[in-house]
Image: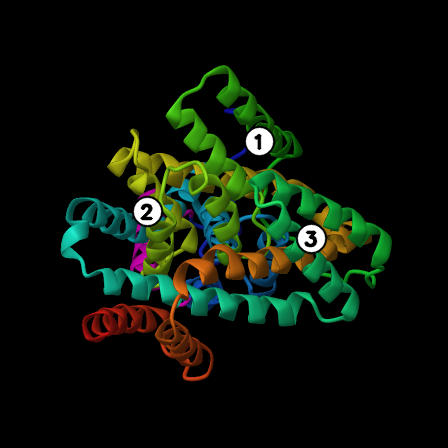
Amino acid sequence: MTSEPAPSLIHESGERVPAWSVFLIFLRLGLTSFGGPIAHLGYFRDEFVTRRRWLTERNYADLVALCQFLPGPASSQVGIALGLSQSGYTGALAAWAGFTLPSAIALILFALSISSYGNAIAPGALHGLQVVAVAVVAQAVWGMGRNLCPDALRVTIMAIAACIVLLVPSAWGQVGVIAVAGMAGLLLFKPAQVIAHYPLPITVSYRAGAVWLSLFFALLIGLPVLKQLLPNQAVAMVDAFYRSGSLVFGGGHVVLPLLQAEVVPSGWVSNEVFLAGYGAAQAVPGPLFTFAAFLGASIRTAPSGWIGGLICLVAIFLPSFLLVVGTLPFWEQLRRNVRTQAALAGVNAAVVGLLLAALYQPVWTSAIHQPQDFGLALVALVALMFWKLPPWLVVVGSGVSGWLLGAVL
């Protein structure tokens, strides 16, 4: 790997950006980027296309298209690619760390506070965080459904996927649904010829890309085997979170059913704590995948706390790094391949079905027990979708409302 040329992007000034500078730029974004992945991409465009001119509008659009094509959190992957473009591999790590650590640290602290002072936190407030998760996931299902299921055929795939996942509630059941949906897409969809686009000026050699992609698949296949050969809690955590990060198509919210299937049935985290953490994750800036840090810190057996949080955080983001760097050299061919686009159409429809199933189980069944729960979830949904209030404000308001309802009723 040392002989490979350092990845670079043609900067307007012709100068490379130091990795520490990349870290500080993304740290500011990690502290201020509220609103989810679509908002994050808007922040990135303003920062790196308009202000800093690291790349052109057309290059940025093509980079976003690549990261939306790959499984994983699109906004974090765009950040990794931008850091790679300016400072090579150390820049990619610096961009990821700056954008991710603020929300990860906040969520680990929240997990530790629940663990240490759970009895001091009003149960109604925690229940309010569980209820707001209903509104957040419902909003995600509606938005993704409108974009990814525009016709009857894809709506049908979505419905079938939701039913199968509810009948086979396991991580492997979800993986099977995604695989079958991809094959169905190959057979059923005939997308139009891909529109001409502008190649990304980021140079990673074919050899280096093949090495990174080989490592991605080696870990995806090898970690479950290693878990069987070496029954160790840390190995099991890395396997579960790496697999979840590898199979999430369609955005951060889709990681919810995958993680729930890994950590709740195994007894690592209770369903109540899981949903409270998911609700709290809406109130912090940065990527939603940092929810993994909360779960790692909340696991009942060692490693947990700070070590567990960092293990799960790195494990869930590692596939994104390997896929972005590994796919860049092959993106031209992939994007022009209509069969790839057809398979992706089927996968995206199934992803909406997975999220729809998660909206019912565990989100709805664990949070909506009484009429006031439904009313609070409805108010939160209206606040998000129609009043366009910031998610963090809706989360805080739901926690306060849950505490007040618990005290009054």
On screen, residue 237 above or below 250: above
Residue sitting at x 83%, y 59%:
189
> Can residue 154 be seen in this snapshot?
yes
Residue sitting at x 38%, y 41%:
313
Q: Identify the element where label 1 is drawn.
A: helix
In the picture, the disc for residue 220 is: 1
If you read the primary sequence from the N terminus, does the residue marked by circle 3 or circle 2 appear first?
Answer: 2
Q: Quadrant of the C terminus?
A: bottom left
Left or right of 274 in this view: 49: right
In the picture, the disc for residue 294 is: 2
In the picture, the disc for residue 347 is: 3
Residue 371's image quarter?
A: bottom left
Estimate how packed mark 1 is, as few (under 14), some (14 to 19) or many (20 or more) residues with alpha carbons within 10 Å. Answer: some
Residue sitting at x 46%, y 60%:
365
Residue 356's image quarter?
A: bottom right
If you read the primary sequence from the N terminus, does the residue marked by circle 1 or circle 2 appear first?
Answer: 1
- Please state the extent of the stretch shown in magenta in the rendering: 16-35
On screen, residue 3 above or below 131: above
